[in-house]
Image: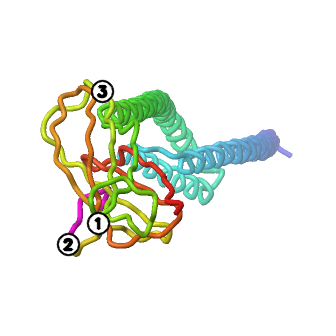
Amino acid sequence: MTEKKKIQKSNTWILVTALVLIICGLVVWNLTQRSELNEMVEQMTIEKEELQEEYEDLAIQFDGFQQMDIRNDSLQDLLSREQQRVQDLLEELRQTKASNARRIAELKKELATVRMVMKDYVRQIDSLNATNARLTEENQIVRRENQQVKEQNSQLSTLNSQLSETVTRASMLEITACEITPLNKNDHKTRMTSHIRKLQFDFTIAKNITCQPGMKDLYVRVMDPEGMLLGEKEGQLFPFESGEIPYSLTQAFEYTGEAYAGSCFCPVEEVQKGFYTVDFFCEGNLIGSFPFQLKK
């Protein structure tokens, strides 16, 4: 073998060896890259799962906000929009491959942005809740004060009513005494019921300086033992309480505030033995009632 052939053969072995080494190096490099890529994909899968959990937690928090009684329509609309945004990003994350590191990183930044927005909403909600709590407490205080005012007004109204009633009663006339005398046709006193033609009532009205002085009308009702009104005539009525009732006789008198003594007479045609009652009325009030008995 010549020297030239020896050199060529040696160069060929060197070239082959170099190629083998290069190929082995490429294989090793490729395996290394593939291993690193697998590790990277595995790491990105873990990051994606963690990011997905964070998005799901955020979605749950937004659901919780929707359950709250937020009495602010504008804030409620903003929360609804952000909630929908989180749902859309979560759905996109689920569909994004773990190998898409760029988009996962972008979604991670979006998550941070949504969290910042949520913190601001939480602050607004807390402020709104604090304001509502304060207003609720103020409203309760106002209600209690109004209730106290109503109770005080009711008490004052009751007191005024009682005072008014007291004043009314104090200004009422009162007949303190009444003497009944049966008379015959000659106006002489008699005890025989068959002879009685008239009943005389001598009464005394007590002194009352609170009563308005002036001319007054006295109405008298005389009831027999059977509850029949003596001396009743058609259309002979006077006002009492909410209506009108008949009377036996009426008499005008002038009252000055001092004690007043007067007399009135009730004509009768026929009377019977038993218990009678005479009632006196003035200015719509019953001012005296006296029972009496005719025996013979």
Is 282 placed above or below 295 here?
A: above
Number of labels in the image equals 3
Which residue is at 35% across, 67% downward? 230
Residue at image mark 1: 246
**How far separated are the C-alphas under marks 3 and 1?**
28 Å
Tag 1, which secondary structure? strand
**How far separated are the C-alphas under marks 2 and 1?**
8 Å
264 vs 279, nearest the viewer: 264
| Rendered location of residue 238, percent (x, y) | 23, 60
Which residue is at 64% across, 49% downward? 56
Is 273 placed above or below 109 here?
A: below
| Rendered location of residue 79, percent (x, y) | 45, 46
Instruction: Name which residue type carries label 1.
Output: Pro
Instruction: Name which residue type carries label 3.
Output: Lys
Q: Residues within 10 Å of mark 1 (few under 14, many from 20)?
A: some
Return the disc, 3 or 2, that comes first in the chain's sequence.
3
- The magenta segment: 236-247
Tag 2, which secondary structure? loop
Residue at image mark 2: 235
Is 115 placed above or below 275 here?
A: above
Residue at the left extreme, as displayed: 215
Which residue is at 48% across, 55% downward? 84
Return the disc, 3 or 1, that comes first in the chain's sequence.
3
Residue at image mark 3: 207
Q: Residues within 10 Å of mark 3 (few under 14, many from 20)?
A: some
Quadrant in which residue 253 is drawn:
top left
Instruction: Name which residue type carries label 2.
Output: Gly
Residue at the bottom extreme, as displayed: 234
| Rendered location of residue 75, percent (x, y) | 40, 43
